[in-house]
Image (cartoon, rainbow, N blue to C red):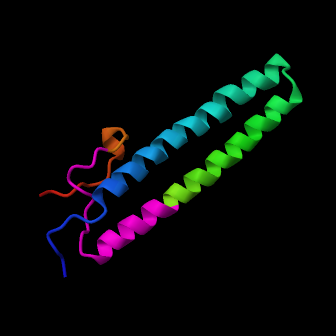
Amino acid sequence: MTDGEPRYDRTLAAVMWMDAFLSAALAIVCLIASPIVAIAGLPHWILTDLGITALVLCGLLAAFGAITFVLIWLRMRAGHYWLPSGLRLPLPAAMRPPIDPH
């Protein structure tokens, strides 16, 4: 059932990296920018814009999570049960999932 061709390797890598960048952007907006704007007493519309930005980032993170799920599901359905061997994940070593041993 498995074929020798890699399935969705580049797409999976791109989606995982985009997910990491969006996570960093959401952390910056929520943990750094929002308290600064609230403490500094800037106009209320800036806080509203930050809230909308956070909601958009949350939506994009959910979408990229769904895309990652579908790509991994399609890989497993094709018989590729490991993540691609050349995949470089933006995670600390202790958090990295097993990569294809081949």
Q: Residue 42 vs residue 52: left or right?
A: right
Q: Position of residue 91 (x, y in %)?
A: 37, 41
Location of residue 8 with respect to 31 vertically, above or below: below
The N terminus, quarter of image = bottom left
The range drawn in magenta is 66-88
- Exactly how many numbered labels are in the figure? 0
Quarter of the image for residue 82 reads: bottom left
Judge whether residue 71 is colored magenta.
yes
Q: Position of residue 59 (x, y in %)?
A: 63, 54
Residue in the picture at 53% in, 42% down: 22
Quarter of the image for residue 53 reads: top right
Location of residue 58 with respect to 77 vertically, above or below: above
Q: Position of residue 92 (x, y in %)?
A: 35, 38
Residue in the picture at 80% in, 30% down: 46
Q: Residue 96 vs residue 25: left or right?
A: left
The C terminus, quarter of image = bottom left
Residue at the far bottom in the pictured view: 1
Quarter of the image for residue 98 reads: bottom left
